[in-house]
Amino acid sequence: MNTLVDLLSLALIVAGSFFVLTAALGLVRLPDFFSRTHAPGVLDTLGAGLLLLGFALQLGFDLTLVKLALVLLFILITGPTAAHALARTALQIGVKPEVDGRDDRVAK
């Protein structure tokens, strides 16, 4: 039984690490501001959630599990909200999304 929990925890931690690294790569490699905002907003939230679930399985029932649950709740609320606020502000100041290979400079 303990081995099954360890394997599931390892799978969640590896998957979470993959998503966080993919988000970091997307932040660097994607073409325009809105794409670069979208990748971490979605993938970091998913990756951090998977990592925290993997850690929670390793901990078992403890006070630390409650703290991890609160951190997960905070990440689930703030990550997408921050990405949305950045994208909305960029639109309000005139940043245009890239279309057909054009860049995302501020509109004139």
Image: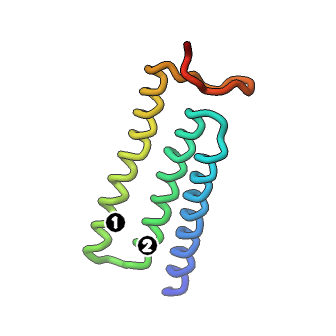
| Mark 2 vs 1, N-terminal side | 2
Disc 2 + disc 1, Cβ < 8 Å: yes
Residue holding disc 1: 68
Q: What residue is drawn where x is 57% and y is 40%?
A: 36
Q: What residue is drawn where x is 55% and y is 13%?
A: 108
Q: Secondary structure at mark 1?
A: helix
Relative to the observer, which residue lies in front, 85 or 74? 85
Determine the CA span between mark 2 and mark 1: 8 Å
Determine crowd level at label 1: few under 14, some 14-19, many 20+ residues with C-alpha closer than 10 A: some
User: Residue flagged by tag 2: what amino acid is it?
Assistant: Phe
Relative to the observer, which residue lies in front, 2 or 83? 83
Q: Is residue 57 left or right of residue 42?
A: left
Relative to the observer, which residue lies in front, 8 or 70? 70
Q: What residue is drawn where x is 50% and y is 79%?
A: 5
Q: Is residue 96 left or right of residue 2?
A: right
Q: What residue is drawn where x is 29% and y is 73%?
A: 64
Q: Specify the label residue 55 is tagged with.
A: 2
Q: x, y (%) of residue 92? A: 44, 20
Q: x, y (%) of residue 50? A: 49, 62
Residue 61 falls in image quadrant: bottom left
User: Residue flagged by tag 1: what amino acid is it?
Assistant: Leu
